Amino acid sequence: MAKLRVGILGSTGTVGQRFCQLLEDHPQFEISALAASDRSVGKPYSEACPWKLKTPMPKNVRDIEVVPITPPLDCDFVFSSLPSGVAREAEESFARAGYPVISNSSCFRMEEDVPLIIPEINPEHIGLIDVQRHKRGFDRGFIVTNPNCAVMSFAPPLAALDRAFGVKEAIVTTLQAVSGAGYPGVASLDIIDNILPYIAGEEPKAETEAQKILGSFSEGSIEKAEFTVSAHCFRVNVVDGHTASVRVNLNSTSTLEGVIDAMREFPSAGLHSSPERFIEVCEEPSRPQPRLDRNNGRGMTITVGRIFPDNVFDYGFVALSHNTVRGAAGAAVLNAELLIDRGVI
Amino acid sequence: MAKLRVGILGSTGTVGQRFCQLLEDHPQFEISALAASDRSVGKPYSEACPWKLKTPMPKNVRDIEVVPITPPLDCDFVFSSLPSGVAREAEESFARAGYPVISNSSCFRMEEDVPLIIPEINPEHIGLIDVQRHKRGFDRGFIVTNPNCAVMSFAPPLAALDRAFGVKEAIVTTLQAVSGAGYPGVASLDIIDNILPYIAGEEPKAETEAQKILGSFSEGSIEKAEFTVSAHCFRVNVVDGHTASVRVNLNSTSTLEGVIDAMREFPSAGLHSSPERFIEVCEEPSRPQPRLDRNNGRGMTITVGRIFPDNVFDYGFVALSHNTVRGAAGAAVLNAELLIDRGVI
Amino acid sequence: MAKLRVGILGSTGTVGQRFCQLLEDHPQFEISALAASDRSVGKPYSEACPWKLKTPMPKNVRDIEVVPITPPLDCDFVFSSLPSGVAREAEESFARAGYPVISNSSCFRMEEDVPLIIPEINPEHIGLIDVQRHKRGFDRGFIVTNPNCAVMSFAPPLAALDRAFGVKEAIVTTLQAVSGAGYPGVASLDIIDNILPYIAGEEPKAETEAQKILGSFSEGSIEKAEFTVSAHCFRVNVVDGHTASVRVNLNSTSTLEGVIDAMREFPSAGLHSSPERFIEVCEEPSRPQPRLDRNNGRGMTITVGRIFPDNVFDYGFVALSHNTVRGAAGAAVLNAELLIDRGVI
Amino acid sequence: MAKLRVGILGSTGTVGQRFCQLLEDHPQFEISALAASDRSVGKPYSEACPWKLKTPMPKNVRDIEVVPITPPLDCDFVFSSLPSGVAREAEESFARAGYPVISNSSCFRMEEDVPLIIPEINPEHIGLIDVQRHKRGFDRGFIVTNPNCAVMSFAPPLAALDRAFGVKEAIVTTLQAVSGAGYPGVASLDIIDNILPYIAGEEPKAETEAQKILGSFSEGSIEKAEFTVSAHCFRVNVVDGHTASVRVNLNSTSTLEGVIDAMREFPSAGLHSSPERFIEVCEEPSRPQPRLDRNNGRGMTITVGRIFPDNVFDYGFVALSHNTVRGAAGAAVLNAELLIDRGVI
């Protein structure tokens, strides 16, 4: 079976690099076009891109000439990891030109007609695509998004609890890795022997996206879940891996065992890039740790630990997600696999 | 006026070193005895102590010969920064032998007859000393304690809010510096490119000490404050400075301005080591930061920022305290100054 | 073909863990015995070992019960990563009991009758085994060693230059990762926002081992190479990967191209764990970097960069080696593969 | 006595901030003008400057309105910490307009008629000022420079050895702090769990400036010292403090005691900002360390340790200097104090 040909918008950034890494040996996709900003256009990718990943740049992308971020692009669909400033216009123009756009950018996530998807949780939200096409006058193209990288650490365990017991409210503090800010991103002078108590624009995303993801889709629209989330977002001295400290109130009573089982047994999506377990629960009190656990399930597993009854809310736990894999490029790849599985691409 | 002569129990550890540093030019105290474990006994302090502070070891302690942790000790009172394992027996024996013991150890903090004091908040709790002497049969000696270093970051702003509006409950996540674990303490392999989601024994202290500190003293006993605290304690890649992310529910309504004013105007204790401001409120969203703010007020100020109405609770904020100064040695020194001011020593 | 059954002495340390990781799917070896100090004996490995590697503990070792470090051991030969204090007696007793001992410890490296081997450089030194057996009265057993982890970063490029042009002298400064000190090893308080200018016992090893490795074996003994090495060894804030800054004087003239080619074309040993290239030369001025290059060749490649004519000596370059793979466990595994290839095991 | 009024060119950068900090309570200078690039002009300094130092921004500069980097400026002389790109034109225009320019920039350092001064070593080089005025047609103005921050770590001990024994050649490897790259400077992704083996443009400065500083001034020109230096410059995960690993060959024989004494007894310049000791020699093998020793002598002392006979050269040692104090702003302030002392300003 022929592979689908993929274009990457914003291909030289940290998330763009992850796309190249994750798609190196992908059975369904092959990279055919790499788009980036003007200063990269015309150069071979190996020259345009300040590669920062630990595995070497895949051979199949080294010689691809970087092209501008405008349609047409030589591909069947596009992944986008464009910065917010340019994403809105570029992604809409690609969708309008007939390309499915699987976006990691934040600009369309909360629009009423744009699906915000985690395949294990709300695959049925892809039904919004028809609404979107109709509303925006798209023909074959559309836009599908994945959540913010911080949300990806705590939305999965909240989803497990919401299904099993109903979530009433959650208070979250995130400890986020520097790779989430891209490159050059966080200055070393700001993070050595230090933490930063604020990430611009992050907390509103963390407080709203989960309700949409856990909302119900019916009659062409999504009704958001009713719980509320409070988020404090910190930057810490970690390369990859966002950790969330979570306290949650539930709508119905539950045992500790019930809480653990709800997470552990949350089913995988069964797609190519799906990890064996969507949520892994560890029992040692000192886990999860970013350096030791971020690569669980090749970076696609959410690792949860320290699940206990809480002094103020019903339960507390700590959740970890690899922010540039499961929280960004890997999330988009999984969404693309879902769309193929459902016949949308 | 002659200075009081001070002994330090556990003088070679990270907190013991801070005592030496803070007392170098103190107008009321001079160090006359340094006690430590057997392997240090008999050596000059300069040889026994693996000095880790940025300022050089004070000249006045270099040649003092380290003695065992048993009374009698050549001093008027003692500061103790003994590890939990040995603190209980040693501190009690010093109190019994007639020495005031100003302790940074955790073992007696929650005992009913032992004051747990932050001079700005609950100086009247020193009234417990009489109860303690009577109950334990101490003559001139007694034990006074200061709080856990994590508690010191968030108890002061909670105290400000409790006085002004009443605190109902608080959910806290702490990001704690490695110096809190002493030396050698946290292994570098555990903290480079990493965080640790668990600090053994820390959360129970963080969840109980504030209620005692904010409790009311009457008729010879303390009635604890009624709010509840939930604490998640993390270790992060920071040398000094514990940061707390706090969400709080209040008993009465308040404006944001009222909350800020309550903190900012909380009065100083007016003692020698008191900072100009007990609580400093910063307005830039990216503050407080440990590396930039831990030394505010020579390490004795609590710095608070990001005060906002919260999505789930009434308010959220971030608080920072220098863990080995205000959260340990400096807290004990301030307690000693209080006891002198009140005529107890 | 049946796999050889392997015992690991010092199996719970950082290098012991690497042995378990590297041998997980090895075609020639399977782990049959794990030995460690008394406090681990009797426990399953999964419980006795504080696993610190990023990949999970291999399933095939989790349930093995840890046994004492004394023969007999249920295996065909042993790898040893014992600390210096106990290595000498234990390794000799295993060799005497008939076991081939492939050791990463330093105690026997410089003994006249013990081969110190890098398979790509001096495989012929295994001829010393007969001398050793005769001298020490060993029957089937023997001891073979691999170099110190710092030496492993610069000895390979020096070997390439020595073969091609003759090395006269070298001045080396190493920047070594904290994993080289084992666990808990370097205290975080000593390395955050800091470097350490001294590693106890390291510089003498770095200054003497290369001459033995590059020495010639004839008539039953090794004549050491004649060049001299000066080494300054620093500890830096890096998890894995030792970097060496090297300046070298040669015995004969050479061009820059000649120097680069000598390194690049140094042949691989062609063994199972051999990397495709023994020495990889990178051309970007900002490489090699530990985080980006330590895993080249699955941690078995030496990466060299910044090769230039020097202002004082003939040439300068920077060399990097993964200290717990190529510089420790991987080196020993490669030595075992060499010994099998040559029919010695 | 009235203080001289000082202007700072490049006042908002990391070195500009150090100038403000060091001049806060200076008895001879007061800041009267702060100049910076266009995007800061017109704002109060407190708003224009991303202050990154641990002590708070001095009150006396907070409200000064930032002005453009063009004469005239309301001051008696200027300190310059301009980036290389703009320094040449701006500094020359200030000198031509009659201002003494004390520059930390690199552009004029190696020009024949510009003094490159360390007051303890070559104060007589200020004689070049007359030559410079004559050659460039300056009237009252002139340009005086201080060395590169890496050079400042090893040039002082080399100067001590050169005076006592003659230096023939030196091989240096520097481990430099991130603050040397300014702000934002080094990206956190490049330095967490990593080192960088290259700093653009640094090695040529490190290899040439010491010869000029140690050169002799006679008949209106400087004859450079004859020794050669080889430098490898690394960036490491340290906030402040450049460390140099040095091996040196001398022209005459010396004892280890002689070498140590030559450093320890190198006289101070006796100026206001001079440290008690120019070079401090520590004896513990694990010192100097950046975090513990960079603030020796309020950041103005060079700390040297690990002085030993070397295996290849005559001696080796490790030297440390605070790169933004003694290696930048503090060096310029000391030069200004020298010029006043000698009646040149």
Image (tube, coloured by chain):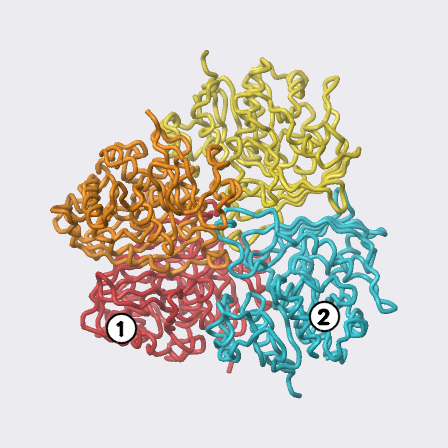
Chain colours: A yellow, B cyan, C orange, D red
Query: Can residue C259 be seen from the camera position used here?
Result: no
Where's the N terminus of chain C, which quadrant? top left
Pointer 2: what residue?
B144
Chain bearing mark 1: D
- Left or right, C184 with reference to C125: right
**In the rendered image, the vertical position of residue B204 relative to residue A329, given as above or below:** below
Alpha carbon of mark 2 to alpha carbon of mark 1: how far? 54 Å
| Mark 2: secondary structure | strand
Q: Of C124 and D195, which appears nearest the observer?
A: C124
- Left or right, B67 with reference to C153: right
- Residue C278's disc is none
Pointer 1: what residue?
D256
| Mark 1: secondary structure | helix
Badge 2 amino acid = Val
Q: Of A262 and C256, which appears nearest the observer?
A: A262
Q: Position of residue D324 (x, y in %)?
A: 44, 62
Q: Position of residue A310 (x, y in %)?
A: 73, 44
Number of other residues with Cα within 10 Å of mark 1, as a class: few under 14, some 14 to 19, many 20 or more: some
